[in-house]
Image (cartoon, helix red, strand yellow):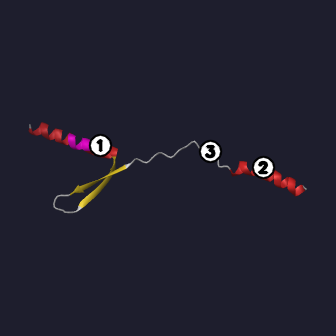
């Protein structure tokens, strides 16, 4: 009888202890990588370059800035 009472008491307490604590912190999402094929001059092989979209946009902006500077200097 005593073992029955103890086992019921332990089984009633077990689900509370087994439940993992809820965490509100979520892992930040990884930025999506965008891969592009690049051919180097003098080579038949393609080179694969992978960057985030933000990095591709920044690189494109840098190229446009340098082209604009060339136009101002030579013109």
Q: Is residue 7 left or right of residue 1?
A: left
Q: Is residue 57 left or right of residue 20?
A: left
**Earlier residue among tags 2 and 3:** 2
Distance between mark 2 and mark 3 Cα atoms: 20 Å
Residue lying farthest to the bottom in this orientation? 44
Would you name the residue on which mark 1 appears? 57
Distance between mark 3 and mark 1 Cα atoms: 38 Å
**Earlier residue among tags 1 and 2:** 2
Magenta stretch, residue numbers: 60-64
Would you name the residue on which mark 3 appears? 22
Q: Are marks 3 and 1 in contact (CB under 8 Å)?
A: no
Q: Is residue 45 above or below residue 62?
A: below
Q: Residues within 10 Å of mark 1 (few under 14, many from 20)?
A: few
Q: Is residue 40 above or below residue 73?
A: below
Q: Secondary structure at mark 3?
A: loop
Q: Position of residue 1 (x, y in %)?
A: 91, 56
Q: Position of residue 8 (x, y in %)?
A: 82, 52
Q: Position of residue 28 (x, y in %)?
A: 48, 45
Q: Is residue 28 left or right of residue 47?
A: right
Residue lying farthest to the right in this orientation? 1
Q: Say how many tags the image has.
A: 3
Would you name the residue on which mark 2 appears? 12
Q: Is residue 57 left or right of residue 4?
A: left
Q: Residue at 87% of width from left, 57% of height from top?
A: 3
Numbered circle sitting on residue 46: none
Residue lying farthest to the left in this orientation? 75
Distance between mark 1 and mark 2 Cα atoms: 58 Å
Q: Secondary structure at mark 1?
A: helix
């Amino acid at each position: 009888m005593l073992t029955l009472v103890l086992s019921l008491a332990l089984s009633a307490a077990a689900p509370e202890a087994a439940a993992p604590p809820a965490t509100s912190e979520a892992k930040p999402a990884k930025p999506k990588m965008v891969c592009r094929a690049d051919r180097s001059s003098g080579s038949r092989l393609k080179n694969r370059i992978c960057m985030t979209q933000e990095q591709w946009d920044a690189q494109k902006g840098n190229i446009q800035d340098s082209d604009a500077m060339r136009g101002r200097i030579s013109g």
